[in-house]
Structures are given as structure tokens and as C-alpha cells.
Amino acid sequence: MIIADRKPLEEILEMIADVDNIMLVGCKGCVTVCNVGGLKEVQILSSSLKIARKKADRPLQIEEVLLERQCDPEYIEQIRDTYDRYDAVLSMACGVGPQFLSEAYPGQRFFPTVNTKFMGGAVTHGIWEERCAGCGTCVIHHYDGLCPIARCSKSLLHGPCGGSADGKCEVSQEIVCIWDKIVLKKMEQGRLEDLRTFKPAKDWRSARDGGPRTSIREELVQ
Amino acid sequence: MSENGYKSGSNLEKVLEAGHFAFTGECGPPKGANVEHLKEKMEHLRGQVDAINVTDNQTAVVRMSSAAASAIMVQAGLEPNFQMVCRDRNRLAMQADILGAYSMGIRNMLCLSGDHQHFGNHPQSKNVYDIDSMQLIAMVKKMRDEGKFLNDEDIDESPKMFIGAAANPFADPVEFRIYRLASKIDAGADFIQTQCIYNMPRFREFMKKAVDMGLTENAYILAGVTPMKSARMAKYMAKFVPGMDVPEALIKRLEGAGKGKQAEEGIRFAIEQIDEFKEMAGVAGVHLMAIEWEHKVPEIAERAGVLPRPQV
Ligand code: SF4
Ligand code: SF4
């Protein structure tokens, strides 16, 4: 799923410094699962904003809303009757949410409240890690299901680089060297030779480098 | 092969082909456009080494480009070993710079991944890694031997580079390092310069494997030597440089030399190493990285008995 972190309260307060009446829209998708933009987080942010504004002597009105998903026009429609009653709308969804909203309602201003970071999952309670960079041409079958594009700091297709030490990446002790894991897994399986095959330079057109991407499923298009 | 039978015809290639024990040096371009400073540093190496590595934004710190600094060396009658990392350029810029470097008379090139920009003075920058060092080696070989760009288009006059690559026998996972070296040689590396060696027993083992696997028949391996200036430097490298193996015994030895004598002890150790490399099966030369110690190179070369350098 998509993992995001809440923006600092100060940054959000700054964005809405000139408004007095907002709609705060959560999302039941990924951001609910990663505890950043679901019902609970909408309530927490809402009260934090109200308290801060009250202290600053400029009270803020907030309408709390939770949509099924903000990456689907069907659910975006649910605020059509109400969106323009507010000075601005704050989305707690990933970066997709405010954009779907903004495109649906040209007359309104939409602000993000989270920093969208990566595609990954929770490795343990409260800790999420990146797993996929959405390169558009998955090659992890060459690496026993581990992705060097998203998880090697240099996206090396032939690793590990000379900075790999004790299973950690040269960039930080906090980063696992995925190449160390790939090699160990191949060694365990007695298939180290797999890693001796040369991989040609990647075609990055399928990644973001080729420009914004679209996915068309002909059978579903009416 | 070009008409004269050499791949590039560089001095380094000729020295190695003739069977001499090669001796290369290193020179980091200035943090600015100070050509005089560069010239002063590189002059220390004249006549002492067969080629001079010119680093490419080493440790991800911005400096004069390695292509420009290499060209200045060519103009001064010195032979550069032009380094290129994959961190800062995509395949368009890389191929353009390779053509440019060749047209300026540069004939050796070292293909590297490069330190992550996190280490340097622009950690905010985008990290490119369009291709990796393995693919860079193969690309330079393709440009040279097939006369084609990476996209298979013909090159009008191809760049004939003597292709180098790096190897770190001490990085993890250790068991894999020899295979990675083998892959680099398969990809097209003509010569290899290793990471600085301090742990001699481990390096002996590594070289034995290289010889047993026949790798030394297909590429020249130059052993990396960086003299320690002090016990402090040794401790720092042991602790903070990822993939560096500095044995405790060496640190003790430097400390034991006493105040003011540690640098001399570091040089002594380096010379002992070079003496052993001269005899070690499969080692074709030494790459001396006397970082910000270029003026010491003549003394080290002299005492290591690698002078005069062969004229080929
Ligand atoms: S190879 Fe590409 S698509 Fe597959 S996991 Fe890695 S980044 Fe994602
Ligand atoms: S240490 Fe490992 S993860 Fe980090 S850049 Fe090198 S190969 Fe990639």
C-alpha cells in the first residue's frame, strides 16, 4: 500500500492561516491502514488545529468527513453538495486524494496534510518500509523476489557496491543492504551463479522517467 | 583492437602488456577552478607513475570535472586515468563525456558506481544511477569494440579506452566479491584497481581465488595502497569508512611508532606491502592512492624500488 506521514502541525497551520472554515477529508484506503489519514487521525488533527487556532485568537470551524477512497471519482462525488461551503478543503489522503478532489471541483482550494512517501508495508507494528518504486517493469524474479531498484540506495542491478558492510548499506546503519540479502538468499539456495548473468541497462521509460503514466484496461473501458 | 594491436594504446596498457609491474597514482581535482593547484599536485607524480587516476566528484563532493582535469594532464604530457561514477550522469551525459574525454587525448578510464551523494556536500541532490558500474564497463567496451552507442547506433569514430574497474575484496558479503570481480572482467574490464588493502592475509586469499579462477589471465589486477598518515587516520578508516578492513595490529603498530613517527611507519608498511605485491601471483601492479600526500609519492616510489618507470 501507499505509506504517508502526517505533515507537522505548524506547516498545516501556515497553509490555512488565512481561512476560518474548512472541510477536513479523511480516506478509508491506505492512509487508514498506515494510521495517518483515517477516522481517528481526522479527529486528532481536527482538534489540534482548533486548539491551536483558538490559542491564536482566530477560531477555526472544521467539518470532518471520511470518504471510502479519495482515488475514485465515485467517492469524490460524495462531497459535491457541500464542498463549496468552506474556505478550503484539507485532504488526509495520499497525494492522489487532493488531486482527484481538485480536478473534480475546480472552484475550491485543496491542501495536503500528509507527505506521501512510498509503496511498502508494515514490517512490525508502527514501522513501515519501502518495497516497490513502481518502475513499471518488474524484474524481481531475477533477485528471488527482492527488489534492488526500490531497496538499493543506488538501484544497482549488479550489486552489492563496495560500501556494503555487515548487511547494512553505506548510506546508513538504518538501511538494510538489500544486495547483501539477495546474495545470501542465492547462496543459501546454492544458486549464486544466477548473479553472474549480465543485465542490460534498464529501460526507464516504464518508470516515471518516461513521463506521467497511464494504465488502460481495454476490457473495462466503456 | 586498434591498428597498432592495442585496445587504446595508452601508456598504462603498454606497460602492462609488456609485462612490467605497473605503478599508478591518484590526484583529486581542486574544489574550484584553481588550475595552478592541480598542476602543482600532479607535477609531483611526473615520472613516478604510469598513469594518474583523476577522481570524479570523489566522496560526492563537487570538484573540477574529472574530464577537464584529465585533459589538463594530457596537455601537460601526463597520462590520466579518467574516473567516471554512475551517480551524477545518465547514459546520454556519460557517453557524451566519454567521447569528449577521448577527443581530448584521454585513453584510460575507470568505471565506478560512486559513493552515494549522502556522503558529500550536496546530499539534497537527485541520485541518478541510470546505469550501474557493470553496465558502464560494458557500454565503454561496446563503444570501443563495436563502435556503437548503447542504443546500437553507430558512432562516428569510436573512443578507444583502456577500461578499468574497481574491486573491494573486503566489502560484504565477502564470499561474493570474487564473483563480482569476475563479472566485471566478463563485462569488459581490462584492468582492476582494488580498494586500499590493509589486511594482507585476506588479500592473499582473495588473489589466490582470482588466480585459481583464471581471472588474472583476462585482466590486470593492481593492488590498492594508501599509506596511513597516523594511527588516528587508521582508526577513523576502520570505524567510519564502510567496506574498509583495517586490522587492529596495524593500528597498534602505528601507535607503537610514537609521536611524530607514525607517518614514517605508515610509509614503511606501504613499502612492505608493495614489496610483497611485486612477488604475489596475479598482481600486475600497484595503485598508490596517497590522498593529499602527492608530494610523498616520489619518496615512496623510490623506496619501493619501482623507479625508473618503464618507457614503452
Ligand atoms: S522491480 Fe520495479 S515494479 Fe518490481 S518491485 Fe522493484 S520497483 Fe517495483
Ligand atoms: S550498500 Fe548495498 S544497498 Fe547500499 S548502495 Fe551499496 S549495494 Fe546498494
Image (cartoon, coloured by chain):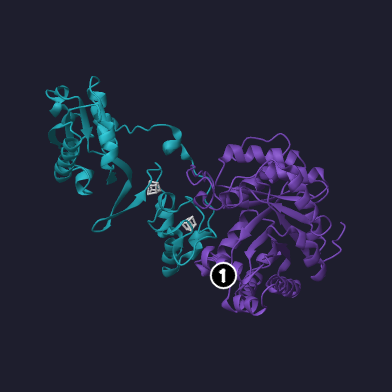
Q: Quadrant of the C terminus of chain B?
A: bottom right
Residue positioned 74% across, 43% down in the render: B35
- Residue A122 is at least partly visible in this image: yes
The residue drawn where x is 58% and y is 71% is B246
A187, above or below B256, in the image:
above
What's the chain of the residue with tag 1?
B
For the residue marked with disc 1, what is the amino acid?
Answer: Lys
| Residue A97 left/right relative to B110 | left
In the image, B187 versus B196, the foreground residue is B196
- Find disc 1 in the rendering and name its residue: B235
When the figure is inspected, residue B156 is found, relative to residue A199, above or below; the finding is above
Answer left or right for A133 relative to B254.
left
Total tally of numbered discs in the picture: 1
Q: Nearer the viewer, residue B3 or B276?
A: B276
Q: Quadrant of residue A212?
A: top left
- Which chain corresponds to the colour purple? B
Residue B8: x, y in percent?
76, 49
Classify residue B49 as left or right of residue A103: right
Position of B40 with respect to B98 (left or right) is right
Examine the rendering and report whether any part of residue B107 can be seen.
no
Question: Residue B121: x percent and y percent?
Answer: 54, 47
| Element type at mark 1 | helix
Which residue is nearer to you in this view: A146 or A16? A16
Rendered hue of chain A is: cyan
For the point 14% across and 45% down, the residue is A40
Instruction: In the rendered view, tell whether residue B166 sits above or below residue A93.
Output: below
